Each structure stands twice: as C-alpha cells, then as structure tokens.
Image (cartoon, rainbow, N blue to C red):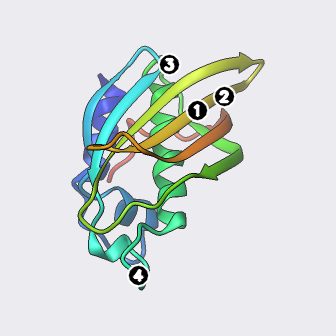
Amino acid sequence: MAAKKWLESLSRIKPTLGRFSSVSLSGIHVISANHGRVLCSFCIPAYLTDAEGYWQTGAIATVMDVVGAVAIMSTEDTLKVTTDLAISFFSQAKFQEEVEIEAQTIEQKGKLTMVVVHIRKKGSKQLVAVGRLWMAFSSARPFESKL
C-alpha cells in the first residue's frame, strides 16, 4: 500500500529544523492505512512539547494534516492539500504519553474531500483533539518524490 509506505517513510526521517513535518512525524507508527481510514500511534517526544511538557498545538495540526492526506491517498493515488482546517481541542497530551491518531474520509464534493481526524490518549481513550479538514487536488506526486 503506497499511502502507508509514504507515511512510514516520513516517520523514519530524522527531525531537522528545516522540515517541520518531519519533526512532527518522526516516530509515528502506522497501524493501518486502507479504504479511506488511517490508524497510527505516536509517543510524544520532548522536542514537540511546550515549557510545561504538553504536546504543542502546531505539531498536532501538522500530524492531522499529513495523516488526513494519507487517508485520502489510501483510496486514490492522489495527494490532496488542505484548503480548510478546523481543530477542536479537548485535553492535553504530555511528553512520553502515547496517543492514537485515526483519520477517515467522510465526504466527497467535486474535487474536495472531507477528512475527520481524532486524536485520543491510548490508555484512557480520552479525546485530545478533533480536526475537520477539507482537502483539494495537488499536482504533487508523493510516491515519486525523493525524501
């Protein structure tokens, strides 16, 4: 499955300051990616936390954006980019806490696809955040790019 392999390749990139998405995704574990649904787990590293040790909201948004795109790629060989992103935050995740990230395609309207991403604490299943993304076609081909 090309979508799963692409996300897994991003998870293996060493974090560097020049590539924010690689910093936010380094270490993500892809459990499954097929039929418009992606399930991942992620242990919050120290470099993605704020002064109090909580997962930074910008890093959460980046994870939602990429995992949402992979949900679409799991059904079509197309990279779509976010045109609208709304995130509701419910609780905070801390350094070394493991979370589950689940993205699912919900609706198709013309060239737009809606994806919903849920992030929950792995142990308690407490909701951390929900993202609603509308994504549109991009001419980029992630499966052909060199990482």
Q: Can you say whether 13 is above or below 82 in the image? A: below
State the residue at coordinates (60%, 30%): 115
Give the class, few, some or many, for how many residues have Cα within 10 Å of label 2's Cα (few <14, many ≥20).
many
State the residue at coordinates (70%, 47%): 86
For marks 2 and 3, the one nearer the N-term is 3
Nearest the eye: 144 or 33: 33
Secondary element type, mark 3 = loop
Viewer-nearest of discs 3 and 1: 1
For marks 3 and 1, the one nearer the N-term is 3
The residue singled out by tag 1 in the image is 116
Residue 133 percent across, percent down from the top left: 65, 39
Give the class, few, some or many, for how many residues have Cα within 10 Å of label 1's Cα (few <14, many ≥20).
many
Q: Residue 76's mark?
A: 3
Secondary element type, mark 2 = strand
Give the class, few, some or many, for how many residues have Cα within 10 Å of label 4's Cα (few <14, many ≥20).
few
Residue 56 percent across, percent down from the top left: 47, 69
Q: Can you say whether 130 is above or below 51 in the image? A: above
Q: Residue 114's mark?
A: 2
Residue 121 percent across, percent down from the top left: 35, 47
Q: Are marks 1 and 2 in contact (CB under 8 Å)?
A: yes
Amino acid at dot 1: Val
User: What is the spatial separation of the Cα atoms under label 3 and label 1, in whole angstroms?
Assistant: 17 Å
Q: Is residue 62 visible?
A: yes
State the residue at coordinates (78%, 18%): 110
Amino acid at dot 3: Glu
User: What is the spatial separation of the Cα atoms under label 4 and label 3, in whole angstroms?
Assistant: 40 Å
User: What is the spatial separation of the Cα atoms under label 1 and label 2, in whole angstroms?
Assistant: 7 Å
Viewer-nearest of discs 1 and 2: 1
